[in-house]
Amino acid sequence: MSEDQTLAKLLQEQGVSRRGFLKFCAGLATMMALPASMAPTIAEALENAKRPSVIWLSFQECTGCTESLTRSHSPTLENLIFDVISLDYHHTLMAPSGTAAEDSRLQAIKEHHGKYLLVVDGSIPIKDGGVYSTIAGISNLDMLKETAEGAAAIISVGTCAAYGGLPYADPNPTGAVSVSSIIRDKPIINIPGCPPIPVVITGVLAHFLTFGKIPELDSFGRPLSFYGDSIHDRCYRRPFYDQGKFAKTFDDEGARKGWCLYELGCKGPTTHNACATEKWNQGTSFPIQSGHGCIGCSEPGFWDAGGLYQPVTASPTDISDYVAPALVAGAAAGIAAGLANRMKKASAEKNHQKVTNDDLQT
Ligand code: FSX
């Protein structure tokens, strides 16, 4: 697909029927918590969308986020979205390597300055000048700052990029931090989960392509359409919780009857994500349906909270430990335009290893 080609033309070439495409758009509308009547609007926007340049940077992570996306078996949604973007840099997926790969990134920055989407997975180590993770001899910190400067918006994919994730867990030897603790002057959408649900990633991309702005976010910078409900709110085992029927061990009678896993440590009541509705592996199942409690991987600090098999006793997470203060203040209010200015004024973020200006000047 060339840069000027629209999705409508691409679909035509691939023999996708208008009816099939509208069905796909109706699915997107549902996924984005929009009325079904929005499907034609989404269809029109996507059909006429020009390929936006996307630069995808992977930092301190396990590649689970990219695996999640690429192992998705849906032949429609993911493929269509990835056909309509120009993925100009993704060091796991791209064909060029070495100098040619870095040239691709620099060229995309130059050619699409101010217009490209930056997707980041993985946390950014800032201790000791960022020496703990480099790509092409460039520290993650420097690469993020250089690439973010010309981005229209940033999508932090996975809990590592959104809140620091596992690398941030105590004792955080590399000084890992989130994207929003470093970049303060761009709209940032967090799509946490370790890894995140693939259709949530593509749903957010579709929202951006359709409406040209970022979706409404919660106080942790997550799209409300996917993270607005807790796992507990939408869990099919919820009636057992309400009746006080709890499995006490993983192999007792209650477990066999599918009773609530709360007493076995399920973090569903304090975790916001779409696992209970979107599920995994093409809507096949999700951890609770497979008999294991939710571990809360889309919440900041989930690993340090510990007690994977202890019942929830959580006090609310102190959001300012993980997300830039301006993001906290502005998140709930449909932040696309005002966020950039507010974020510029953000003060330094708290952290295990407090982020200081010195850390960020490498
Ligand atoms: Fe983190 Fe993603 Fe968990 Fe892994 O890129 S959110 S460790 S699934 O890979 O960053």
Image (cartoon, rainbow, N blue to C red):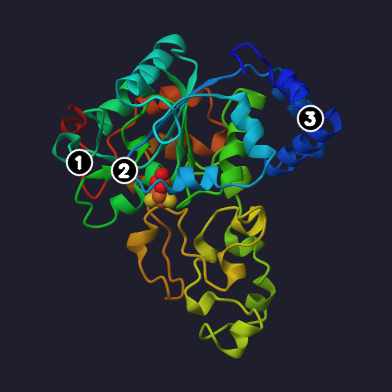
**Mark 1 — residue?**
132
Mark 3: which amino acid? Val
Towards the viewer: 63 or 224: 63
Up/down of 123 relative to 137, above or below: below
The N terminus, quarter of image: top right
Query: Between marks 2 and 1, how big is the CA–CA gap?
Result: 9 Å
Query: Between marks 2 and 3, how big is the CA–CA gap?
Result: 39 Å
Whether tag 2 and tag 1 are in contact, CB under 8 A, the answer is: yes
Q: Counting other residues with Cα less than 10 Å from the Cα at mark 3, is it few (<14), some (14-19), or many (20 or more)?
A: few
Whether tag 2 and tag 3 are in contact, CB under 8 A, the answer is: no
**Mark 2 — residue?**
60
Question: Which residue occupies 27% across, 36% down?
Answer: 348
Up/down of 205 relative to 32, above or below: above
Q: Counting other residues with Cα less than 10 Å from the Cα at mark 2, is it few (<14), some (14-19), or many (20 or more)?
A: many
Residue 279 lies, in percent from the top left, at: 63, 56
The C terminus, quarter of image: top left
Ligand 1 within 8 angstroms of badge 2 C-beta = yes
Which disc number belongs to residue 320?
A: none
Residue 185 lies, in percent from the top left, at: 38, 24
Which disc number belongs to residue 16?
A: 3
Q: Nearer the viewer, mark 2 or mark 3?
A: 3
Towards the viewer: 6 or 211: 6
Residue 18 lies, in percent from the top left, at: 84, 28
Using residue 58 as the reference point, say whether residue 249 is left or right of it.
Answer: right
Q: Which of marks 3 and 1 is in front?
A: 3
Can residue 156 be seen?
yes
Mark 1: which amino acid? Tyr
Mark 2: which amino acid? Gln
Residue 242 lies, in percent from the top left, at: 66, 76
Secondary structure of the residue carrying numbered label 1: loop
Res. 214 image quadrant: top right
Using residue 292 as the reference point, say whether residue 149 is left or right of it.
Answer: left
